[in-house]
Amino acid sequence: MKSTHELLKAGYAKFSAPAKLNLFLKILNKRKNGYHNLQSIFQLIDLQDEIFIKIRHEDTEINIKNSSLQIKPKDDLAFKAAQLMLLNQQLGADIIINKKIPIGAGLGGGSSNAATVMMAINKLCKFNFSNTKLIESSLKLGADIPFFINGKNAWVEGIGELLHDIKISNYIYIVMVPNLSINTKEIFSCFKLTKTTIPLKISSSFNAVDHDFVENDLEETVIKKYLKMAELLQWLSSFGNAKMSGTGSSIFVRAKNLKMAESIKKNKPRNANCFIVKGLSVHPFYSTDQLGSRQAG
């Protein structure tokens, strides 16, 4: 892949697509269409994919290159997002994605890429679609995409499309990902609702005392199927209240400080990747904070 400097010189625009953590996940019930109603808190983090986009004015071709060979171009949510945005527009796009968010880890990388492509094309082509319209369109592709378009940390309900802004301090997290990818559909199909779940009251700010001990309801299903996940969860739990994000395979714990985070990373098991990440208050697309400007440089 060409360097950032070369791509910018060639006329590409650069955008960041951040990952997210599910700070907890409650599964309330199952809809008639097979989807599950849930409650969660989604936290943006500064682990980010890089997306480079150049609009094609000469034809309607959409070309996509992903640094991960695991993702076939036609299956890439980012490709589908570009198709959706450029339908009937007499424009095309060249898209290059530099993947840094692990795939199949419950960190929302694919959804984030799709959201960033939609927002970027809307900006570059001066379509001026409102966020409400973008969110409405994005639901055709996936339930997590609206969260990234909305661009703020959120209390999430429904199948993931009902968002309420929530204030969360920019905590430091250790995120560990074993060398495996977990299929979301498979986990939901194996998950059994055993009791009536009482919904939590919507909150406008994250409260560690109230929310830290709300579990991920899918965790038990995953660790029964994947021994690596059970072992990693047990290891990370010795440093705090470790949880799985989404349907896995990432497991995270909030660190008291950077020193603690670096110590955990230094002693991590060999068979897992480890990321020290920080929470974001706003999506880089809408942000001109130091993080955004540092990454742009």
Image: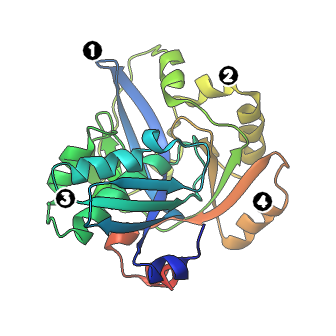
Quadrant in the picture for residue 276: bottom right
Please tell me which residue lies in front, 129 or 36. Answer: 129
**Disc 4 target residue:** 264
**Disc 1 target residue:** 32
Identify the residue at horizontal 66%, vertical 70% (top origin).
257
Q: Earlier in the sequence, mark 4 or mark 2?
A: 2
Residue 52 placement (x, y as % from top left)? 44, 68
**Which amino acid type is marked by label 3?**
Asn
Spatial CA distance of label 1 from label 3 is 29 Å
* For the residues bearing labels 2 and 3, Cβ distance under 8 angstroms: no
**Which amino acid type is marked by label 2?**
Lys
As drawn, 150 above or below 125: above
Q: Nearer the viewer, mark 2 or mark 3?
A: 3
Quadrant in the picture for residue 130: bottom left
Label 3 CA crowd tier, 10 Å (few <14, some 14–19, many 20+)? some
Label 2 CA crowd tier, 10 Å (few <14, some 14–19, many 20+)? few
Label 4 CA crowd tier, 10 Å (few <14, some 14–19, many 20+)? some
Q: Earlier in the sequence, mark 1 or mark 3?
A: 1
Helix, strand or loop status at disc 4: helix
Quadrant in the picture for residue 261: bottom right
> On the rendered structure, is 141 left or right of 279?
left
Helix, strand or loop status at disc 3: helix
**Disc 3 target residue:** 131
